[in-house]
Structures are given as C-alpha cells and as structure tokens.
C-alpha cells in the first residue's frame, strides 16, 4: 500500500490491492486447514478474477467490498472442526478491522467538487481568497476548502470555477 500510493497516488487502487491481499491471504490460511479439492479452491479464485472483467458498471471500491463480502462468506462457509471458532472470528475481525483502518480516515478527509459559473469576479483576485471562500460557503452551504478557476469571461462578467468542499458529494 505505502509503495504504490507514494508512487502513483491512486488511493482507490491502493485500497483494492491491500484488501485483495488480506482476503487472499486469509483464504489461503484457512483453505490450507480444510481438506478440499485443488480444483475447487482454484475455481474460487478464478471467479474473483473474472468478476472485475465482467462488471464494467461497478466502481473499483464497490467491487472490493463485493470481494470482501464474498470472501468472508466463503471463509465462514468452509470452516470445520479443524478451524477453531477463535481462529475464524479472529480472521473475520482482522479483515473488517483492516478495511475500517483504511477506509474510515479516508472518509473523514473525503472531498467533493462541483463546477460552477461564478458571477463576482472581484473576489477572484489573489488578495480576496478568504472572502471568495466565505462567499461560496455562504451561497452554497458547503464547507469550501479551495477553488480552481478555469476560465474568466470579462464580457459576461462570469468565471467558470470548480469548488472543492469537505463532505459527501453533492
């Protein structure tokens, strides 16, 4: 996670890689203790691999959660007398705990953005930055953290901007 994120800044893929790793490791540890056909075990992994290519409409993060749900279900289903209840609960808690450790801080920092046509060009000057943020927060009701100006049209006295804010996407 740390190496990939530092190099590529792809939080969504980094999250997916960590979770796939945890689930795969957990499956392997528990499947090692359960007597089953190798073909069945490989078939389970093949299903997970195919999921990504068959589901174009599902976001990477949603697909990862789908993988978590399926993986936990399989882990709990294949448990037998060779896998103690303590081991099973521990693996479930580790999977959910790692997911929470990665997701919850990210959700707290999550930002949304929305494009706007802004009509008060005087506040776009660099010395008016705090007044611009306050005006946008007052008009939109959002906790505005930054603004990106794309185009200024002096004839229409308007600017195309993108407003970045904390909280869920609008």
Image: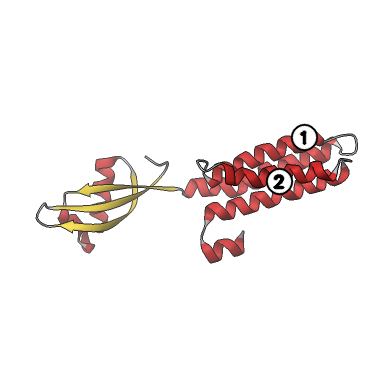
Give the SS element for disc 2: helix
Task: Looking at the picture, tell me which residue is in the foreground, 11 or 147.
Answer: 11
Residue 64 visible in this rendered orientation of the protein: no
User: 148 left or right of 36?
Assistant: left
* Rendered residue at 62%/43% (across/down): 51
Residue 128 sits in which quadrant? bottom left
Q: Mark 2 points at which residue?
A: 46
Q: Which mark is residue 76?
A: 1
**Figure quadrant of the N terminus:** bottom right
User: 43 left or right of 151?
Assistant: right
Task: Looking at the picture, tell me which residue is in the foreground, 75 or 44.
Answer: 44
* Image spot of residue 110 (x, y percent): 46, 48
* Image spot of residue 49 (x, y percent): 66, 47
Quick check: 131 above or below 79?
A: below
* Local crowd size for mark 2, using a 10 Å CA cut-off: few (<14), some (14–19), many (≥20): few
Quick check: 127 above or below 115?
A: below
């Amino acid at each position: 996670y740390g190496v990939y994120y530092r190099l590529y800044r792809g939080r969504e893929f980094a999250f997916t890689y960590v979770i796939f790793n945890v689930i795969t490791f957990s499956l392997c540890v528990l499947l090692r203790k359960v007597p089953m056909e190798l073909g069945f075990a490989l078939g389970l992994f093949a299903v997970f691999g195919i999921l990504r290519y068959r589901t174009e409409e599902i976001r990477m993060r949603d697909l990862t959660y789908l993988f978590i749900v399926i993986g936990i279900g399989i882990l709990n289903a294949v448990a037998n007398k060779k896998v103690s209840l303590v081991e099973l609960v521990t693996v479930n808690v580790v999977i959910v705990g790692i997911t929470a450790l990665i997701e919850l801080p990210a959700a707290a920092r999550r930002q949304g953005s929305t494009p706007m046509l802004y009509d008060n060009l005087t506040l776009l000057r660099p010395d008016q930055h705090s007044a611009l943020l306050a005006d946008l927060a007052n008009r939109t009701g959002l906790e505005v953290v930054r603004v990106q100006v794309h185009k200024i049209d002096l004839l229409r006295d308007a600017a195309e901007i993108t407003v970045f804010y904390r909280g869920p996407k609008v």
